[in-house]
Image: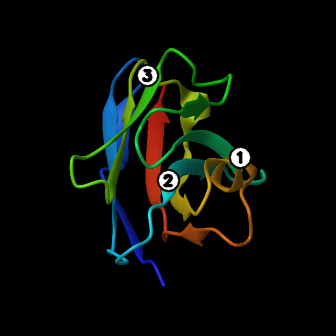
Amino acid sequence: QVQLAESGGGLVQAGGSLRLSCAASKRTGTSYAMGWFRQAPGKEREFVAAINWSGSSINYADSVQGRFTISRGNAKNTVYLQMNNLKPEDTAVYYCAAGEKLAMVVAGSMNNYWGQGTQVTVSS
């Protein structure tokens, strides 16, 4: 079992920046891809970004490409999402996900592990 804990959400004006963090409990002998999803009120959860265990492969949603950057900490059990030039449409609850394969994370597999979410609100 992997437990994920997000932090770093908050309220920011349009054009501002936020950095989200997600710390995963360690599971000896298992390497996980990690990523971020978001869900706005009245909408389905959508993929934002994902990164494989080594950091050599990264995927972004078109809507955040060039504005958001995903990275992993040196200990590999932490993933970050640097969000720049935020827009009101980025307002959502952001969820961290972890899965055994990058493709599973990107697809939002039911077999992924999920955090509880952190609220990001961008005012216009």
Q: Nearer the viewer, mark 1 or mark 3?
A: 1
The local secondary structure at tag 3 comes to loop
Give the spatial CA distance, label 2 vs label 1.
15 Å
The local secondary structure at tag 2 comes to strand
Residue 14's label in the rendered image is 3
Amino acid at dot 3: Ala
Q: Tell whether 39 sits left or right of 7.
A: right
Quarter-of-image position of residue 19: top left
Q: Is residue 110 above or below residue 12?
A: below
Instruction: Return the disc, 2 or 1, that comes first in the chain's sequence.
Output: 2
Residue 52 is situated, as x and y percent measured from the top left of the image, at 50, 45
Which residue is label 2 attached to?
Answer: 34
Which residue is label 1 attached to?
Answer: 46
Residue 2 is situated, as x and y percent measured from the top left of the image, at 45, 78
Q: Residues within 10 Å of mark 2 (few under 14, many from 20)?
A: many
Amino acid at dot 2: Met
Q: Tell whether 118 sits left or right of 47.
A: left
Residue at far left of view:
74
Residue at far bottom of view:
1
Q: Nearer the viewer, residue 37 or 32?
A: 32
